[in-house]
Image (cartoon, coloured by chain):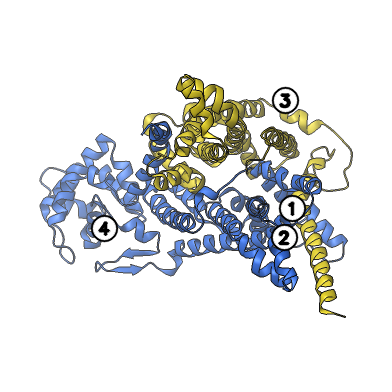
Amino acid sequence: MTSETTAVLSERVAHRGVRVFSAAVLIFLIAPILIIVPLSFNQSSYFSYPLTGLTLRWYELILGSPEWRTAILNSFVIGLSATAIATVLGTLAAIGISRPSFPLRGVIVPILIAPMIIPIVVVAVSLYLVFAPLGLTNTHGGVILAHAALGTPFVVITVTARLMAFDTTLSRAAASLGATPWAVFRRVMLPQILPGVATGSIFAFATSFDEVVVILFIGGTEQRTIPRQMWAGIRDQINPGILAMAGLLTVFAVVLFLLIGWLQGRAGAPAR
Amino acid sequence: MRAFLLAVPLLIFLAMTFIVPIGKLLIMSVKTDEVANAVPRAAALLTDWSGPPALPSRQTFEALAADLQAAQDGGTLASAARRLNTYEPGFRSLLLKTVRQLPIPEGEQADEALRRIDQRWGEPETWRLLGRAAHRWTPDFLLTAMDHRVGGSGAIEPVEPSQAIYVGAFGRTFAISASVALICRVLGYPVAFLLATLPARQSNFLMIFVIVPFWTSLLVRTTAWYVLLQPNGVFNALLIHSGLTAAPMALMFNRTGVLIGMTHVLLPFMILANYAVMRGISPAYQRAAVSLGAHPALAFLRIYVPLTLPGIGTGTFLVFVLALGYYITPALLGGAGDEMISQLVALQMDRQLNWGLAGALSVYLVVFTLAVYVVFNRLVGIDRLRLG
C-alpha cells in the first residue's frame, strides 16, 4: 500500500468518525426535548414509557389554572415591555459604537456587554438592594427595568454586526441630497439594519421570557412568570402540568427558531 | 461626539439598573453600620478601650444600656442584633434579653446591672466582638468568604474546618465550570466542523438540532433532564433494558446530573461560536498543504485547527463564564455536595439576610469573572462575539 492510499483511507475513517460522533452529540442535544414532549400527553401521571394513553388533560390543567394564566400573561407583558426598552436603547448605542469617531470604544463596549457576563445571582441581589428602598421590588416596573438591562447586550451585538455590513456612503449620499438626520436613519439606515434589530429584540425577549433568578429576588407573587411558576412547581412537587408547559414552550422555541431563520434569509447573508 | 451621545441613554440606563446596584452590593461587603448606628455612644467609647483582658469603662456600660433602649425605640436594634449574630451565635438573644430587663434600677451601677442580667457582659471577648462589629468598615466578610477571620489576638487566622465552606465552594464552582467548558469543547468541535463543511442543505437541516435546543427555555431543558434522569426515569429504563446496568444508576442530585444538565444547556454556544469561525475558513488552505505533500491529518492539525482558534476561544470563554454564574441547573440537578457559589449567595440573601457575606462572595465571583472577561477581550476581542 502506498502512503498516498493510507492517507486517503485514514481521511475517510476520520470523516466517518466525525459523522458518527456528531450524530451522537446532536441526538444528545435534541433527545431530551423529543422525549419529554410525548410524556406531556401521557394519560398516567408517571413520567415513563410506554405511554398509557393519550390525553390533553395536562394542557387543560395548565390553561385552565388562573395561576398559570397570570404567569403566561405576565411573561408576555414583562417580556415585550423589556424588549421595547432594550431594543431602542441598544440600537441607538450600536449606531453610536459603529461610527469611527466613537471615543473610548475599548472601554465602553465591554461595559455594554457586561450584563451578559456578570453572574445573574449577583445582578439579582444587587437589584434587590437598590430597588427595595425605591419601592420597585414586587412591581412589574422593577422587573421590566431589570430584564431590559439584561437584554440590551444582545441588541447591541446583533445590530453592531449588521452595521458592519452597512455602507455608510448611503447615509452620506442621502444627507448630501438634503435628507434630515432622522430621514436618513428612518429611510436609509433602518431598512438595512432591521433584520439585526429584529434578531436582537428576539434575543432580548427570549432572555426575559426565560429569566427566573432576578424574578425570584425582586418580583412578588403578582409578578410570577412562566419560568418562576415552573421553578416553584419543580421544587415543590413536579407534575405533568409542568411537562405540558414545557411542551408549549418547546413549540414557542421552534417558532422563534423559524422567525430567526426567516429574518436571516431576508437579510441575505446571515448576520452571525 | 455625536456618536458618543447615541450611547449615552444606554449608559445611563445601565448605570442605574446595573453598575450602581452592583457597586452598592460590593460596598456592602466592607461596610457595616448597623451596629454603629444602633449603639453610637458605646461604639465611640469602645474605640478608646485598650481591649482584653481589661473590661471597658463603667461609662461604656452606661452608654450601652442607654443606646440599647434608644435603639429598641428607634427600631434599629433588630438589624444590629442580626449583624452581631454573624460574629457569635447567641449574641442576638443576649441583646434582646438585656434590653428586656432595662432600664437599670435606681441606685445600681450599669456594669453591675449588665453583668447581673447576663454574665457574658463580664467577659472581655463579648466587648471585643461588639467593638469589632461597631466599626463602620470591616474586612470581616471578605475574610469569611475566604474561610478566614480575625481572631482574639487580632491576627488573621483560618476558621475551624467545620465552618470552612466557601473556598471549597469556589474551587467546586471553578472545577464544574472548567469541566463543562472542556466537555463542550470536545463534543462541540467535531459537530461544528461537520456543520461547516457539509453542503448547505444538509448543514441547515442538522442546524435544527443545535438551534431548537438553544432557543428552548433553560427551565424546560433542566426539567427534561430532571424527569429523564430519575431513578425510575426514561434514561435508567434504557440502561437497564439494554443490559448495561442491573440496578438504576444515580444520575441526578449528584455531580453527574449537574454536568449533564449544564453541558446540554451550554453546548449550543460552543457549537455556534466554532461554526461561525469555521464557516469562514476556505478549504483551499488545507488542500494546498496536502498537495504540497502534507498528510491530511497533519494539514488539519497545523493549518485548520490554528485558524479555528478564535472560535475555540470564544466558545470556551462563553461556556466557562456563563457556567460560573449558574444557579438553576445545579440547584435542580445537583446534590448536597454540588453547590455552586451562586447558590450560596442566594442562600445568604434568602435565609440568613446576611448582605455583607452575600456581597463578599459576589466580590470574588465578579472579580474572577471580570478577570476572565478582560483576558478574553485582550486575546480574542469581545467584538468577535456573534449571536444567532
Which of the chains is blue? B
Near mark 2 (Cα within 10 A), the count class, few <14, some 14-19 or many ≥20, is many
Q: CA distance from mark 3 to mark 1?
A: 43 Å
- Residue A222 seen in this snapshot: no
**Cα separation between marks 3 and 4:** 57 Å
Is the same chain shared between marks 2 and 3? no
Q: Which residue is mark 3?
A: A64
CA–CA distance in space, label 2 to label 3: 45 Å
Is there CB contact under 8 Å for labels 3 and 1? Answer: no
- Indicate the amino acid at tag 2: Pro
Q: Secondary structure at mark 2?
A: helix
Residue closest to the eye, B95 or A44: A44
Q: Both on one chain, marks 3 and 4?
A: no
Whether labels 4 and 2 belong to a single chain: the reply is yes
Q: Which amino acid, mark 1?
A: Leu
Above or below, A266 relative to B153: above
Query: Alpha carbon of mark 1 to alpha carbon of mark 4: how far?
Result: 63 Å
Which chain wears yellow? A
Residue position marked by numbered label 1 in the rendering: B195
Residue under numbered circle 4: B129
- Name the residue located 60 percent from the left edge and 53 percent from the top edge: B330
Chain at tag 2: B
- Say which residue label 2 marks: B190
Gap between marks 4 and 2, in whole Å?
59 Å
Q: Chain of mark 1?
A: B
- Label 4 crowding class (10 Å Cα cut-off): few <14, some 14-19, many 20+? some
On the question of residue B36 being in view, the answer is yes
Nearest-to-viewer mark from 4 and 2: 2
Q: Name the secondary structure under disc 3.
A: helix
Element carrying mark 1: helix
**Quadrant of residue A20 in the image?**
bottom right
